[in-house]
Image: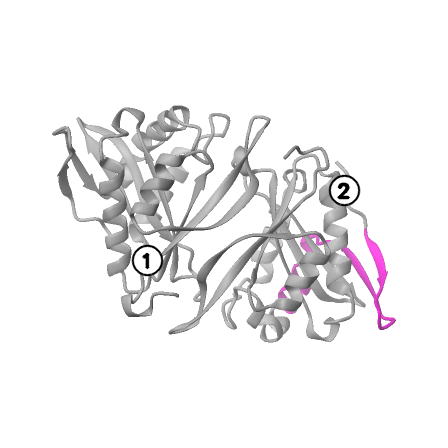
Amino acid sequence: MNMPAQKLVCLRDGREVLIRPATPDDADGLVQYMQEGLPEFTDYVFTAIGEFTNTVEQERERIASLDHASGSMRLIAVAGDRVVGSLGCSAPKLRRIAHVGHLGMATRQAYWGTGLGSAMMAYVIAWAITHPVLELLELSVYADNTRAVRLYQKFGFEESGRVPRSTKFAPDVYKDNIHMYRRVDVEMHA
Amino acid sequence: MSLFPPKTVTLRDGAQVLLRSPEVEEAKQLIDYLDVVRHDTDFLMWGPDDELPSLESEREWVKARRDEAAGVTILSEADGQVVSICGVDSHGPFSRVRHCAELGISIRKDWCDRGLGSILLGELVDWAEVCESLDVVSLSVIDGNDRAAHLYKKHGFEPTGRKRWHIKRGNEYVDEIIMSRWVGDPKAVPS
């Protein structure tokens, strides 16, 4: 299998970031990224502030357990020695759904609008296309997060459905989730 | 912890079935049951090629299901045999998804078409409606399982999406249909 290499990306504002799969040694940086970044992007993800409780050791074990061969990996964007973005792909174990990789991504606020999200998405799609198991990528996004929806559409993701009120922010405050998918196997027949 | 209060139901053909929570000590019977139903039907996520759960992981699963507050699992027993497993399982523990639960159901082939599925769905929906923290129940149907889709509609579930090619059976790709139903405050039904 094509193990993804690191990639140096020059963003629209001229800053450079390195995109690469996380290794267990990135656990420290990822925990710091989540602790500092969550207040910035909590409105767009499932995790509420205070609900990220992984220790560095737990994060290390999680990264070590990712099986690239079965379609699971954690991509990070690094600027200097800091993690500034992350995109995870996880594929289920059951054979009938093992060809579907589920994505989740976020970036630090200082990198919003710089093209970092696009760079990470392009990277993971290129990797998934060459992956022998993955044939579909799937993600879910809040229906009102139009910026993210547009980014996903730009990368070929189409809406496959939604679950009304599947996230709850407060009593009587709900958001719908849109499910989107994209094929990453050109040989797959309709 | 939520345990299902034991209850005996009578099917249209007169057969009696006991509905109750599974016991941790029944892990082996549950694995054997899974091995039977996954060969009975093409409409489960579990296929014949998947590795069966270990006794230890099955015991942990039963324990977790018994301890879960925002979910319930019902084992149906007849003639001393497990004939169905079904349940609703909260997407928790995160606060934003804890109100949402996934429904799953399987029935042994020789116990299908006898009205058991409808009874079990009714029990699960009733349970979810009473459960204070649950507002939404969603489920997946593999395309082609029209009988199940019809039954879910009868119990108030609406299709809200179709995930194309989501199920791979050998070299065949099948769509997965997602359905959901409101079980929260009846005064706050989504429009």
Instruction: Tell me where residue B49 appears, x and y as whole percent.
Output: 50, 26
- Image label count: 2
Circle on res. B29: none
Q: Secondary structure at mark 1?
A: loop
Please state which of the two labelled residues, at mark 1 or mark 2, is closer to the viewer: 1
What residue is shown with label 2? A3
Image-quadrant location for residue A186: top right
* Pick the front one: A139 or B161: B161
Q: Is residue A14 magenta?
A: yes
The image shows residue B61, relative to residue A180, as above or below, that is: above
Q: Secondary structure at mark 2?
A: loop
* Pick the front one: A2 or B13: B13
Residue at image position (24%, 44%) is: B21
Q: Is residue A159 magenta?
A: no
What residue is shown with label 1? B70
Residue at image position (51%, 70%) is: A48
Asked if residue B44 can be seen in this view, the reply is yes
Q: Which residues are magenta?
A: A6-32
Q: Amino acid at mark 1?
A: Ala
Q: Name the chain under label 1.
A: B
Asked if residue B22 can be seen in this view, the reply is no
